[in-house]
Image (cartoon, rainbow, N blue to C red):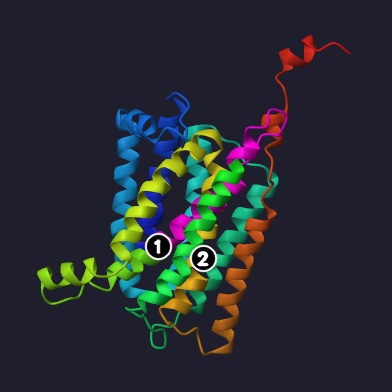
Amino acid sequence: MAAALVANTLYSIGFVLEKRALSSLPEVSIRQPARLLRLVLGSPLWIGGSLALFAGFGAQLIVYRTLPIAAAQGIFVSGLVLLVLLSARLLGEETTGRERYALGAILAALLMVVLSLDERADTVSQAAPYPLILLVCVPSLAAGVWLYGSAERRARHRHRMPTTGVEYGVAVGLLYGVSSLAIKGVSSYLTSSGLGGAVIDLLRSPYPYLLLFTGAFGLVMSQAALQRCRASLIVPVCTTVTCLFTAVLGTLSFGEALPHDPLRLALRLAGTALAVSVLLSMPKHDQSAAQPPIGAKELTPP
């Protein structure tokens, strides 16, 4: 749990630093990935945020070695609270009443998942059949890329209301969900006796290649979306999708059993259901961005 909270802190700091760096950069686009990389790699603030995210990746490896997948995702969702607080403080992003209620629901979901943990009964699986992993991950990657492209096409319509980033967040969340399963798979090789044998076995698995794909596409897609939308909305949506994807499909793929105790099972399922309701309650359009400035209103003829 301590490693999960450290990962939450590092991820929240990393996303906020990257958002702040992107705010001062020219507009980036997934259609120009080389230009995007050149711009972000020239920003020390963005590099600092990326290093924080990479450190969070290391902490996440530790989490997957010690906690069941579903329980870990419930704790990871708690990082959204810190993210929203940092976004308000460092980025000046104001939260609406609905978003504040969502934060309270996230804290309640976290508490339910934590109470569902049982150190004596919970099992942590270390392996999954490769065909099953590919069957889950490949369609999810295709769906994430298609959904992002669809959101891009709709966003180019001039008269469309400004989006909050929900569609972008869902698309990137699917990619990061696959990445999370790959991280779980990589963690299973950390206990191998010989380093050379562990590396060879890892290269024979699909996990490093899934990480390369999700890392490359996720980097370009997330940075373009993060520049256009509020971090306090797009990152919670992305995180919620990632956690739900990993908790449900990861638990099934790696064969981790749910709690046998009825009360603990109810708490874990209720926490997951609450997280789903938070995602569905997110507004699809940014009403504040759709309002023209006061000066523009005064110059508009009747």
Residue at 30% from the left image edge and 37% from the top image edge: 47
Report whether 34 appears left or right of 269: left
Q: What amino acid is at disc 1?
A: Ser
SS at circle 2: helix
Asked if residue 112 lies in the magenta stretch, the reply is: no
Residue 180 circle label = 1
Disc 1 to disc 2, C-alpha distance: 9 Å
Place of residue 254 in the rendered image (x, y in percent of width and height, measured from the top left): 40, 78
Above or below, 78 against 282 in this view is below
Using residue 238 as the reference point, say whether residue 189 is left or right of it.
Answer: left
- Is tag 1's residue or tag 2's residue first in the polypeptide sequence? 1
- Residue located at (50% from left, 55% from top): 173
Q: Nearer the viewer, residue 39 or 4?
A: 39
Residue 157 drawn in magenta = yes
Main secondary structure found in the magenta portion: helix
The residue wearing badge 2 is 245
Residue 75 as seen in the image, left or right of residue 195: right
User: Residue at point 85% right, 11% down?
Assistant: 301
Q: Position of residue 66 (x, y in %)?
A: 33, 74
Residue type at tag 2: Phe
Q: Is residue 73 visible?
A: yes
Q: Residue furthest right?
A: 302
Which stretch appears magenta?
152-180
Q: Secondary structure at mark 1?
A: helix
Residue sitting at 65 percent across and 39 percent down?
A: 154
Left or right: 129 in relation to 154: left
Local crowd at mark 2 within 10 Å, few (<14), some, or many (≥20)?
many
